Image (spheres, coloured by chain):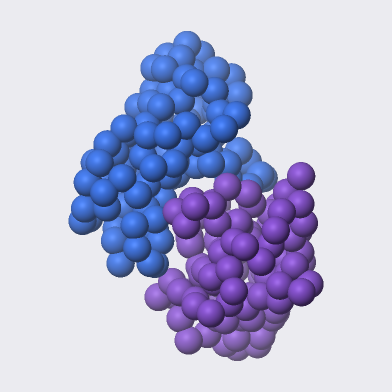
Chain colours: A purple, B blue
Amino acid sequence: QVQLVESGGGVVQPGRSLRLSCAASGFTFRSYAMHWVRQAPGKGLEWVAVITYDGSNENYADSVKGRFTISRDNSKNTLYLQMNSLRAEDTAVYYCAKDWRGYDLDYWGQGTLVTVSS
Amino acid sequence: AIQMTQSPSSLSASVGDRVTITCRASQGIRNDLGWYQQKPGKAPKLLIYGASSLQSGVPSRFSGSGSGTDFTLTISSLQPEDFATYYCLQDYNYPWTFGQGTKVEIK
């Protein structure tokens, strides 16, 4: 069965960096685009970024553009999110999600919490 | 970016009620819209894709309709396990954007 397991969350000071990972299994990882979605405590969902199946193209939410970088290693079935210049408003649970047919998110991980605080 | 306006933000309903949630896009998005259900402490779950297609394994009491700018999620007979928060997501173009969410609570 499809499994997505995020890791790398934690407490980080404003202005510092953090890298999240998402380990995928149960499907042909290299064939699908992958996304990051976040949810601030008590708030709604916010789409963050997407990367194509082969890593050749990316798109970002305006709120993270220039600070976050999505990447993947298809040999390791792993998705990454490099987060630089972190701000308090980046505090959220970060979910990785599998793209389906180029339009939807059919599988999600359990999420990893990032807290940006001094 | 396309803005998605979802309403209501919350509603109270009883088991067996018919529930309708709407989402309006700030520009036409064809039928490139999905509906997701999220329960507390859990990841979202895809219910409806392409505005009106039921995702595999989702009960038939859930249905979606609409095209262009106006979309609706309907639960025909609310069940205890349906109490959750629902989100629409436009996947017409990047950046994808979610509606603000609708919390469905027990009356």
Q: Residue A46, how many percent across, how many down?
A: 48, 60
Residue shown at 68%/70% (left/top)?
A79
Residue shown at 22%/46% (left/top)?
B68
Counting the numbered discs, the total is: 0
Is the C terminus of chain A in the top left, top right, bottom left or bottom right quadrant? Answer: bottom right
Is the N terminus of chain A in the top left, top right, bottom left or bottom right quadrant? Answer: top right
Dividing the picture into quarters, in which one does residue A4 lie?
bottom right
A32 left or right, relative to B47 = right
Q: Residue A116, how many percent across, how many down?
A: 64, 75
Q: Residue A35, how many percent across, how many down?
A: 56, 64
Considering every residue shown, the one lying at the far top of the view is: B16
- Is residue A81 something that shows in the picture? yes
Q: Is residue A78 above or below residue B71?
A: below
Residue shown at 59%/19% (left/top)?
B80
Q: Is residue A58 above or below residue B21?
A: below
A1 left or right, relative to B64 = right
Q: Residue A19, how many percent across, how many down?
A: 70, 79
Residue shown at 70%/58% (left/top)?
A28
A103 left or right, relative to A33 = left
The residue lying toward the viewer, choosing from B78 and B10, is B78
The residue lying toward the viewer, choosing from A21 and A111, is A21
Q: Is residue B14 above or below residue A107?
A: above
The residue lying toward the viewer, choosing from A45 and A105, is A105
The residue lying toward the viewer, choosing from A85 and A104, is A104
Dividing the picture into quarters, in which one does residue B2 lie?
bottom left
- Is residue A44 something that shows in the picture? no
